[in-house]
Image (cartoon, rainbow, N blue to C red):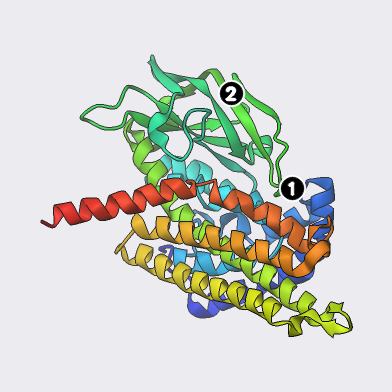
């Protein structure tokens, strides 16, 4: 079976179940997640039972096998609530899992993908470093050939799910970039390998419950079977392709959160009063709601279009950057307006739009900052024009 094998009818059922779970089970627990800075174990178990740890892993390897067009519909539902819930299984399906799906050997896939899809293994994407974030070319972590294996040394930071990870999909330089390629390989490093150290959980502005931490590799030895795809030059390509796909997913997540911010704003405007009049009757409040609504509509259409362009192979580089840029900037504006519409209440902890305002700020930073997206788009357009002369 291929990953496109989920019928429209089956997918409608998956989507309906996810929507029901998000809105009736997770939304009422948002405050617990925020206060405790963790996703409760019972929610995690429900997510595992629903197959969400492997929704984008092909059915051959134990996942649900959703394609990117279906993935974004699911992401728009998951974005409606605390982003920590999606983050818990996001790396398994996204940037980490897709490296194995796209580039792993059959042996690597059969060893790791089924436990990743079931949620028994949490996979982390260990790319970002103090001197290399949105652009993997600056990578400093080194992997050195040693007999029939490799020795890895280096430091990674802001690694999502690192505190709970069982497997680090680790990017390391095997040689300086040359005519043969970027010299970046990717290795499968079990978290319990000797020399792997996970730092303290990061204290972040928002997204409570979504854990990140530094990871240090000190003379970590792995066998040849840990080299993804059996090639030293797969890393850079795998990182770029996995990140590009992930950008479409993050954009969809942003649309889901923007929809929630809009819904909260409309509900507040319809019930809160000033001088006995619902504030929703004031034209300047209506103008803010209209701007929010237009942003959500534009983002949703753009996400669906970018996903289709990815699936058809028409554009897997500029469209993902454009949709990520637009939707993550859009949700920032929508969240800001939501706080404004709520007035003083919008600045209070325990009010959903206050959490949303903090949560979405990260979306413009990870999986490539807005600035990097602009460089990819602008550079790509100019390059295409030069090539067509």
Q: Position of residue 84 (x, y in %)?
A: 69, 52
Disc 1 + disc 2, Cβ < 8 Å: no
Does dot 2 land on a helix, a strand or a loop? Answer: strand
Pointer 2 local density, CA inside 10 Å: few below 14, some 14–19, many at least 20: some
Q: Nearer the viewer, mark 1 or mark 2?
A: 1
Q: Position of residue 169 (x, y in %)?
A: 50, 37
Q: Position of residue 369 (x, y in %)?
A: 49, 46
Quick one: which residue is furthest to the right in this view?
276
Q: Position of residue 62 (x, y in %)?
A: 53, 56
Q: Which quadrant would residue 223 be assigned to in this image?
A: top left
Q: Quadrant of the N terminus?
A: bottom left
Q: Which disc is residue 216 wearing?
A: 2
Q: Quick one: 201 or 300, which is closer to the camera?
A: 300
Q: Is residue 335 visible?
A: yes
Question: Mark 1 or mark 2, which has the lower sequence index?
Answer: 1
Pointer 1 local density, CA inside 10 Å: few below 14, some 14–19, many at least 20: many
Q: Quick one: 130 or 232, which is closer to the camera?
A: 130
Q: Is residue 114 visible?
A: no
Residue visible at 70% across and 49% down? 207
Q: Quick one: 160 or 361, which is closer to the camera?
A: 361
Residue visible at 69% across and 46% down? 210
Left or right, residue 285 beside residue 134: right
As drawn, 308 above or below 121: below
Does dot 1 land on a helix, a strand or a loop? Answer: loop
Quick one: which residue is furthest to the left in this view?
389
Q: Which disc is residue 208 wearing?
A: 1
As drawn, 388 above or below 14: above
Residue visible at 19% across and 56% down? 385
Q: Quadrant of the C terminus?
A: bottom left
Instruction: Give me the C-alpha separation between circle 1 and circle 2.
Output: 23 Å
Left or right, residue 347 beside residue 301: right
Q: Which disc is residue 173 wearing?
A: none
């Amino acid at each position: 079976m291929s990953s496109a094998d989920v019928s429209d009818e089956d997918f409608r059922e998956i989507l309906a179940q996810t929507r029901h779970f998000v809105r009736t089970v997770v939304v009422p627990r948002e405050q617990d997640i925020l206060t405790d800075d963790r996703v409760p174990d019972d929610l995690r178990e429900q997510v595992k039972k629903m197959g969400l740890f492997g929704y984008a892993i092909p059915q051959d390897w134990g996942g649900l096998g959703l394609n990117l067009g279906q993935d974004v519909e699911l992401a728009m539902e998951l974005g409606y609530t605390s982003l920590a819930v999606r983050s818990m299984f996001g790396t398994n399906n996204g940037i980490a899992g897709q490296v194995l799906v796209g580039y792993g050997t059959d042996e690597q896939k059969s060893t790791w993908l089924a436990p990743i899809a079931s949620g028994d293994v949490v996979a982390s994407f260990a790319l970002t470093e103090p001197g290399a974030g949105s652009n993997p070319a600056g990578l400093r972590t080194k992997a050195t050939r040693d007999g029939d294996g490799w020795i890895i040394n280096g430091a990674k930071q802001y690694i999502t799910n690192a505190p709970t990870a069982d497997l680090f999909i680790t990017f390391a330089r095997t040689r300086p970039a040359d005519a043969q390629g970027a010299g970046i390989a990717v290795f499968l490093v079990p978290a319990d390998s000797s020399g792997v150290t996970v730092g303290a959980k990061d204290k972040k502005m928002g997204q409570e419950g979504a854990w990140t931490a530094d990871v240090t590799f000190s003379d970590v030895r792995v066998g040849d079977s840990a080299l993804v795809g059996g090639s030293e030059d797969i890393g850079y390509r795998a990182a770029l392709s996995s990140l590009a796909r992930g950008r479409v997913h993050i954009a969809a997540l942003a649309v889901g959160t923007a929809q929630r911010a809009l819904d909260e704003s409309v509900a507040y405007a319809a019930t809160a009063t000033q001088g006995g009049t619902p504030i929703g009757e004031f034209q300047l409040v209506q103008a803010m709601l209209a701007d929010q609504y237009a942003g959500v509509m534009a983002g949703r259409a753009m996400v669906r279009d970018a996903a289709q362009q990815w699936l058809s192979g028409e554009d897997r580089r500029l469209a993902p950057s454009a949709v990520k840029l637009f939707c993550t900037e859009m949700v920032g504006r929508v969240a800001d307006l939501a706080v404004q519409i709520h007035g003083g209440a919008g600045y209070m902890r325990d009010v959903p739009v206050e959490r949303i305002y903090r949560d979405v700020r990260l979306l413009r930073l990870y999986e490539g900052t807005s600035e990097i997206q602009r460089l990819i788009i602008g550079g790509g357009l100019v390059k295409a024009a030069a090539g067509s002369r």
